[in-house]
Structures are given as structure tokens and as C-alpha cells.
Amino acid sequence: MPATAEADGATGTSPLVAAAAELAARAREPASRWDAEGHVPPDVLRTLAATGLLAADLPSRHGGRDLTPADLGEVAAHLGGVCSALRGLLTVQSMVAAALLRWGTRAQRADWLPRLADGTLTAGFAATEDGAGSALGEVTTAVEDSGDGLLVTGRKRWVTFGESADVLLVLGRHAEGLTTVLVETDRPGVHRESVTGQLGMRAAGIAHVTLDGVRVPADHRIAPPGAGLSHVAATALDHGRYTVAWGCVGMAEACVADAAAHAATRFQGGVPLGRHQSVGALLARSAVRAAAARELAARAGRARTRGPGHGVTETIMAKYAAADAGAEAGRTAVQVLGAAGIAPDSRAGRHYRDAKVMEIIEGAQEVAESHMAEQLLRRFGAVT
């Protein structure tokens, strides 16, 4: 059942899936240290780029590897099974690339996408603000016309890999509507504040970013004003949910494997721990949830093969189920492993913390429930 490298080896049809499995296997031991130190070493990020895993689902004409949704999912599962931060880099890079691919001009795609695909540039998605989390329509970051360019002013929070990103896709408010702008982080007026000690994703280089009158060329705007949230950011978020879902599948399967291995070899009362009914029940519930999450993620992948805009609801369902499965499996693994589960170097403990973050990012569970309920009501004839 598990897709993690140490459990069943590489799955999928692409050599990139095997490359992701190998990278995940090498990352398994140091991942806890990265979590404790609060960053993934730059050489690991360079390796991720060199293997072609960044924005690998872009078309080859834009520097990508034409990775299918199914194989992209397996890549995210391998990385997520050992380190949510590694999967997080894959997620934010592909979020920005997906938004540019669908809504950028021909010139913008030619300029930015190859550099995102080969890792010359690393990207961040800067949308969340103090008063705009799930309700991104409330963002107050200002994007103003200024001569022949744009002036960006505001403060963004919880930007994954915001510490090191070379360019940010910023959601802001223009006089004509919400808009998105690419902002290079070496421009004057960009200030970053590293975030440390948060519950999970501690190696993901999370930062708060202040944009103090940052000037960018007019051609850094992606799509016309008014399309920033409904089109550009929506595409990025949908892509993010898909890779987060698969990352959570890998996380859940890794936790099930760790808990089951411990329960099979640790004896209590002269019998393996897993033979105790209460422990067996915990393992069974976690295994079923992980398997169900994998099936829903696979279904979302099949729906996404129909093209842009397809599979949105299936992806939301997959992310919801997989985040829940990751949280359940993390709790179970920590409980079954006991003291080993709460040790500083415990993968189960780290996944347990990361899983709670997964229930919040790219759409909280409650937001997903509202969307799924609305789709269900429409299906059975509710008046809109």
C-alpha cells in the first residue's frame, strides 16, 4: 500500500518518480535535523532542481518534463512521506508555474517558466495577510499604477520559502479589482522576516514579507485587474491543493508503516503490541483512511487529465481526505510508538505536527466542507 520509498520502492511510470523516491530515501535521516535547524540545506534544493522535479508538470516547450497528474502525485507522495518542507518547495514552485502557464502572456511564459522549471528562480506565493486568510478577497496590499510601472505596498504573512524565494506571486488590490503581480525579492522595498518555532513545516523557510512601495514593470502583472483571485490565484491554489493532497497521502502511509513496524516487533505481555485489540484497531483505522485518501487523490488526478479547470472539486475532496488521513495516522503513530513517537528525531512526531498545518493551508478543512456541501446541494437541485 505505501508509496514511500522505503516501503514499496518507486511507483508510477516516469523516471522522475524514481528520482523522487531516491531523493526521499536520502532525505529520510537528515529530515529531522532540517526540521530542528529550521531550513533545508541549499544543496538539497539544488538537487531537487537538478533532477527536474521543480515544475516538472510544465510542458517541455516551457522547460518542464510533461509530467502527468498521476506521476506528479507520486512525486509529491514520496517527498511528503519524508519531509513536508521538500514537498512544500515542489508545491509553491508548481503553483506559481501553473498560474503563469494558464494566465500569463506568451512573453511572460517564455521569460519566467523556463527559469522556474530549471530552478534558476525559486518562487513563493504571497497571498495571506493578517485579515485575509481563507477570505483572500479581503486582501489590502495595494497595487497602484505608477508611471510606466506598478507600485506594490503591503504585508504578506506565512509565505512558504519566503526566506529564500527569488520571486513572489503577490495577490493585491488595484483600483480596477484584485490583481496578481510578480515581485522579485531583490527589489528595493522588499523586507523579509523569518518565522521560527511554528507548529509544523519548520524547515520550509516560512517568512512574513513587507512590500514597502516596491516598483515593478507593468509587464509583471499576470492577467488583467479583476482576475487576480478568481483566475490567477485560484489556479495556483488548485494546483497547490493537489500536491498537498498527495504529500499528505505519503505522510499518512509513512506513519502507518512506522506504527505497524513498531507494533509488529514490540512485545507487551508476551505478544506483539499490534495483537492487542485496541492497538490493532488504531492501525486498521489509519490504514483505511490512508488507502481511501490515495484513491481520492488518484481520482482527482484522472479528472485533471481532462485539462485546465477540471477536477477542482475532486481535488478539494482529495486534499480534505488526505489531510484528515495524515492527521489520523500521525496521531496513531505517535500513540503506538510511545516515547519514541515524541522524541526530537521522530518522523511520526514531525508528521503529526505537519499534518495539522496541512489541514489549514491551501484551504482549511471547514472551507472544503462548505464547497463540497454546496456542490452536493446543487447536484440534487438546490436553487442557487
Image (spheres, helix red, strand yellow):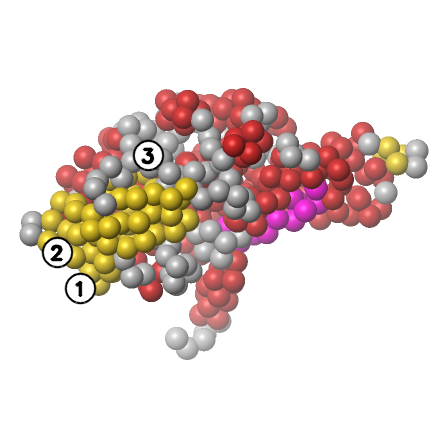
Region of the chain picked out in magenta, as a range: 318-334
> Are discs 1 and 2 less than 8 Å apart at CB?
yes
Q: Is residue 162 left or right of residue 32?
A: left
Vertical comparison of 34 with 338: above or below: above
What separation in Å lies between label 3 and label 1 (alpha carbons)? 29 Å
Please, what is the three-letter code of the amino acid marked with disc 3?
Thr
From the image, tell me which residue sits under label 1.
Answer: 175
- Considering every residue shown, the one lying at the far left of the view is 147
> Looking at the rendering, which quadrant does residue 100 occupy?
top left
Q: Residue at x 21, y 42 (%)?
A: 188
Where is the N terminus found, in terms of image quarters?
top right
Q: Is residue 10 in sight in this rendering?
A: no
Q: Are marks 3 and 1 in contact (CB under 8 Å)?
A: no
Residue type at mark 1 is Ala
**165 over 102 or under it: above or below:** above
CB atoms of marks 2 and 3 within 8 Å: no
Q: Secondary structure at mark 1?
A: loop
Find the distance from the CA under tag 2 to the CA under tag 3.
Answer: 26 Å
Which residue appears at 25% of the width and 31% of the height? Answer: 114
In x, y percent, where is residue 45? 41, 27
- Find the distance from the CA under tag 1 to the CA under tag 2: 9 Å
Residue ID for mark 2 = 145
Whether residue 336 appears in magenta in the rendering, the answer is no
Q: Residue at x 47, y 51 (%)?
A: 361
Decide which of tag 2 and tag 3 comes sooner along the chain. Answer: 3
Q: Earlier in the sequence, mark 1 or mark 2?
A: 2
Residue wearing tag 3: 122
Give the residue type that dot 2 points to: Asp
Predominant secondary structure, magenta span: helix
Above or below: residue 137 compared with residue 360: below
Q: Position of residue 299 (x, y in %)?
A: 50, 47
